[in-house]
Image (cartoon, rainbow, N blue to C red):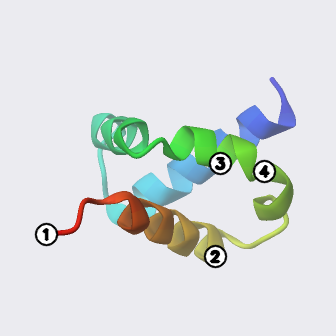
Amino acid sequence: MTSQGKFMIFCAEQYRRAKQLSGRQLSDLFDKYRVWNYLYDCYEALHTTGTSYIIEDIDLYIDARKPTR
């Protein structure tokens, strides 16, 4: 497995735990907002940051892609 793949799994598991999501809920959320692509594309910038930063960054990424009302 590539370093990016391991990193994506790490991020997903940390996010799932922090938000108390099931595996299915996490997968659906990450698929809907293309978080998997984001984590892969931003690996170089994100892999040196801490877990709290990554979770916050994912939240910001998702929030920016939610439709406004």
Looking at the picture, which amino acid does disc 4 mark? Tyr
Image x and y of residue 3, in percent: 85, 37
How far apart are the alpha carbons under marks 3 and 2?
13 Å
Counting residues from the start of the chain, the first of labels 2 and 4 encountered is 4
Q: Which sits in the foreground, 30 or 1? A: 30
Q: Secondary structure at mark 3?
A: helix
Check if mark 2's residue and mark 1's residue have beta carbons within 8 Å: no
69 with respect to 59 (left or right): left
* Circle 1 or circle 4, nearest the eye: 1
The quarter of the picture where residue 57 lies is bottom right
Q: Are marks 3 and 4 in contact (CB under 8 Å)?
A: yes
Of the image marks 3 and 1, the number of the one nearer the N terminus: 3
Q: How far separated are the C-alphas under marks 1 and 4?
A: 32 Å
Identify residue for label 1: 69
Alpha carbon distance from label 2 to label 4: 13 Å
Can you give x and y, in whole percent of width and height, for residue 11 in the image?
60, 52
Could you tell me the amino acid type at mark 3? Leu
Labelled pair 1, 4 in contact (Cβ < 8 Å) = no
At horizontal 48% and vertical 41% (from top left) the residue drawn is: 34
Closer to the observer: label 2 or label 4? 4
Q: CA distance from mark 3 to mark 4?
A: 6 Å
Report the quarter where the C terminus lies. Answer: bottom left
Tell which tag, 3 or 2, sits nearer the viewer. Answer: 3
**Residue 13 relative to residue 8: left or right:** left
**Chain-order first, disc 3 or disc 2:** 3
